[in-house]
Amino acid sequence: MKVDLQPLFQKVEKLSRLHRILICVGALILLLGPSVYFLFMPKHKEITKLEGDLSKLEQELMIAKRKASKLKEVEAQMAAARETFEEAKRALPESEEIPTLLTNISHSGQDAKLDFLLFQPKPEKPKGFYAEIPVSIQVNGSYHDFVNFAYKISELNRIVNLKDIRMTKTGKAEESTLNITCTAVTYKFLETTPEKK
């Protein structure tokens, strides 16, 4: 069966130019519309999504590069902090060094010509990564002898603080002997043991 399109073309030729253009545009829309909708639109949505993902990844990469550029600085800070910690750790005696340190404190007092009436270590007080070890001290001697003792304590290679210093005069007014009580506080590094899981 043959379809004769001649009358249709004749009718179209009789239409105005504007109408013919509109018919062509409409035909193109009818032919291309479904193609655009079913082929192009899904690809366009996928491209938009991928562009968003790309933008996000570029931002993450920029942040990672910024952090990487600061890595050497952070490593240097960590090394400095580790060195400071090791220095502090060296100034805090280990448990086995405490008797030697207490002996050194006692010898410092004897070298300063103080008479020891009391030298009594007290129980240690944990303070996190270190513990305080107080020692009650009572001595007789001159003010200058006690200052010399304090100086000798400051020269020890470990941290020792003198606290709660009380001085009372003993004997006659012309004698310069003092009864001195104080607390010498030294510190010990506490080894932390990993927690059991």
Image: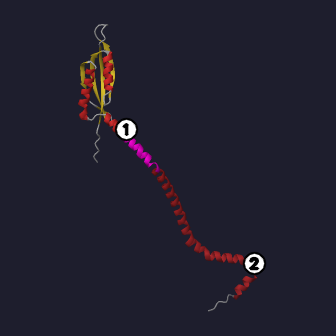
**Residue at (52, 63) in percent of width and height:** 50
**First of labels 2, 1 by sequence position:** 2
Q: Which stretch appears magenta?
A: 69-84
The location of residue 73, given as percent across then percent down, is 44, 46
**Residue at (63, 76) in percent of width and height:** 30
Q: Which residue is mark 1?
A: 84
- Which color scheme is applied? secondary structure
The location of residue 117, given as percent across then percent down, is 24, 18
Q: Is residue 125 left or right of residue 62?
A: left
* Main SS category, magenta section: helix
Position of 169 relative to 80 (above/below) = above
Q: Nearer the viewer, residue 116 or 107?
A: 107
Q: Nearer the viewer, residue 64 or 4?
A: 64
Q: Which residue is mark 2?
A: 17
Callout 1, which amino acid? Thr
The location of residue 161, given as percent across then percent down, is 33, 26
**Residue at (65, 76) in percent of width and height:** 28
